[in-house]
Image (cartoon, rainbow, N blue to C red):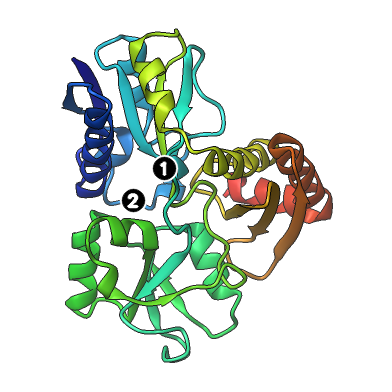
Amino acid sequence: MITIGSRGSQLALWQARHIAARLAELGAETRLEIIKTTGDKILDVPLAKVGGKGLFTKEIEEALLAKTIDLAVHSLKDVPAELPEGLTLSAIPEREDPRDALVGTTLAELKNGAKIGTSSLRRSAQLYALGRGFVTETLRGNVDTRLRKLDEGQYDAIVLAAAGLRRLGWADRIREMIPEETMCPAVGQGALAIETRDDGGEAQHLVRKLDDAASRAAVTAERALLATLGGGCQVPIGGHARVEDGTIHLRAIVASPDGSRIIRGQRTGTDAMTIGNALGEELLAKGAREILKEVYAS
């Protein structure tokens, strides 16, 4: 029996059960262990102000190291660039659409000065950069909670990851898929990460069969970028890679929280780590270092 650790949110449980079903196809029996993380306990403060890395993974990783669970299923964008010693990402299954989605209306239909709900500095900075006077307000909670707040009229629109909406059966709520040129996705967005102990055990061996090579190459480039920039998942950094005919195409941004400065860059190549590191260094040299210093000091 393999024990799967997961957060208790609606989306996290969908993801854990999805992986359980994939493992069942391989003949494995599983059970689910729900673990409450720091990020789940703090619901009244913007995540960017909580600080620290691993807000949604720390307690689950501690359970892995204590051997009370055998594997963890995460949204990859919640996983810090550096993992605790003894743990590894044994599989990155095939990725969902990584783009952000606008729910409620389209960008073109939004009035200047409209109120948009998002919990992400990355999203709000890129909305401000459009120069239309949008006001963003913190939006926390499960996906259904966020949709309810929109339906109650608390916001003119909200921004959510398209992958989460699709996985929970709410694709029909998407009014517009925001092009990545307008809103660069978060590193790892749309991808799942299956984390195990790096011990060559049964769980690690089994989970490796779920790995998708193209998805792993893309997110490896993105995470190398994030590691070079020294950023966590709650800073205004965007990074998205795609693989075409064996070539990795990586796009990235670092934005000031008010959207007044956005440093952009792109790289292509065949070695994921090299591309990610090189683009990270390029962005730092172009002004990202100063922006990130200001974000961490605020």
> The residue under label 1 is which amino acid type?
Val
Kindly report the distance in space between the C-alpha atoms of the residues bearing marks 2 and 1: 7 Å
> The residue under label 2 is which amino acid type?
Val
Residue visible at 53% across and 58% down?
185
Label 1: which secondary element: helix
The dot on residue 59 is: none
Q: Is residue 255 left or right of residue 167?
A: right
Marks 2,1: beta carbons within 8 A: yes
Q: In this view, does 179 lie to the left or right of 256?
A: left
Q: Nearer the viewer, residue 234 or 49?
A: 234
- Residue 206 in picture, x, y percent from top left: 36, 20
**Would you name the residue on which mark 1 appears?**
50
Q: Count how many numbered circles sit on residues in the image.
A: 2
Quadrant of the rendering where the N terminus is positioned: top left
- Residue 253 in picture, x, y percent from top left: 66, 58
**74 is higher (above) or lower (below) than 30:** below
- Residue 219 in picture, x, y percent from top left: 56, 42
Residue visible at 51% across and 34% down?
80
Q: How crowded is mark 2: few (under 14 residues within 10 Å), some or many (20 or more)?
A: few
- Residue 125 in picture, x, y percent from top left: 55, 66
Dot 2 or dot 1, earlier in sequence: 2
Label 2: which secondary element: loop
**282 is higher (above) or lower (below) than 106:** above
Q: Is residue 178 left or right of residue 40?
A: right
**Would you name the residue on which mark 2 appears?**
45
